[in-house]
Image: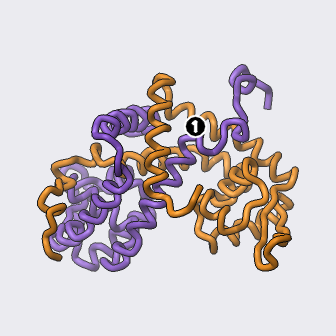
Chain colours: A orange, B purple
Amino acid sequence: MKDSPADARRTALGELGLNNFPPYLMNRIMGRYNTSLRDELAALGLTTPQARALAVLAVNDGLLIRDLAVFAVVEQSTLSRALDRLQTDGKIRREADPDDSRGVRIFITPEGRATFEGLWPHMDDVAAMMFRDIPDEERRAFVATLHKMLSNVRQHEF
Amino acid sequence: MKDSPADARRTALGELGLNNFPPYLMNRIMGRYNTSLRDELAALGLTTPQARALAVLAVNDGLLIRDLAVFAVVEQSTLSRALDRLQTDGKIRREADPDDSRGVRIFITPEGRATFEGLWPHMDDVAAMMFRDIPDEERRAFVATLHKMLSNVRQHEF
């Protein structure tokens, strides 16, 4: 690989340190978030992809599978299996899109909503624990930066 | 579950909106980060756990497996398999800890370091893309908040 001007300016990870590389810190924090919720998910009989699908549908019902995959950050093949199970358990239902005969929209059922409502306090508590002793203003600035970052990296219009 | 004062104050996710729930935004952003690197990892013949282990060892060599698992955010059983493969490929070596006969320390080899050095420019570029048009001062404030959050959630002294 030929050195570009960007390579000449590049700082090695060793000089930067893991703790100054934001994706490392974000992976560490999200790893703890996911681990903290694992027992609650297990108690509710949910996998992470199932839980993410329910959380998104609780807020944004009736999505197409491909859009639900983006919101839930789950690959479509994994999501399809998660939805099969959620449907068997009566937590979601699939409906043909009236505007597109090949499109399928996913709806949360009252039972699915009740499951999510059992999970949400734990999600909210873990998020609150992340921000312990962080002032509201700092939290708002952090979320504003996250919005800019998502807009930089996303490949969809939402 | 009995309502606690925290439940009385709790905001539903539907009122808050996904875009105001930081773990959702962080999952979306890290999902794109991991997807963006997937082709580079595949070209280098690495899985995500293997790549994370090499990245951590490139900076912090000679870790015990349990500490490497924390830094790399990979479960120990998954990490052990990743290390088996990296060892077969000559990218790491295991050494008995001189201070603890049951402890094993992991060292990156020159070949492992060369592999990581082929990957790092892509990791750095994806991170730079995340922060496009975000001023340095805002980035520094964001990283400072990440440090507080990691210190809130972590269960280890690093």
Residue B153 showing in the rendered view = yes
Q: Residue B27's x, y, as percent?
A: 52, 52
Picture residue at 47% right of the left edge, 61% below the top: B32
Front-lying residue, A13 or A100: A100
**Which amino acid lies under the numbered mark 1 shown in the image of this protein?**
Val
Residue B102 higher or lower than A128, as above or below: below
Picture residue at 45% right of the left edge, 36% below the top: A142
**Number of numbered discs visible in the structure rendering:** 1
Residue A154 higher or lower than A88, as above or below: above
Quarter occupied by residue A50: bottom right
Q: Residue A39's x, y, as percent?
A: 63, 47
Q: Residue A63's x, y, as percent?
A: 74, 61
In the image, A130: left or right of B157? right
Front-lying residue, B130 or A111: B130
Q: Mark 1 highlights which residue?
A: A126
Picture residue at 72% right of the left edge, 66% below the top: A64
Q: Residue A157's x, y, as percent?
A: 57, 59
In which chain is the residue bearing label 1? A
In the image, A57: left or right of B105? right
In the image, A66: left or right of B37? right
Q: Residue furthest top?
A: B5
Which quarter of the rendering shows the N terminus of chain A? bottom left
Front-lying residue, B43 or B15: B15
Residue A124 higher or lower than A89, as above or below: above
Which quarter of the rendering shows the C terminus of chain A? bottom right
Residues packed near mark 1 inside 10 Å, few (<14), some (14 to 19) or many (20 plus): some
Quarter occupied by residue B17: top right
User: Helix, strand, or loop for circle 1?
Assistant: helix
Front-lying residue, A154 or A93: A154
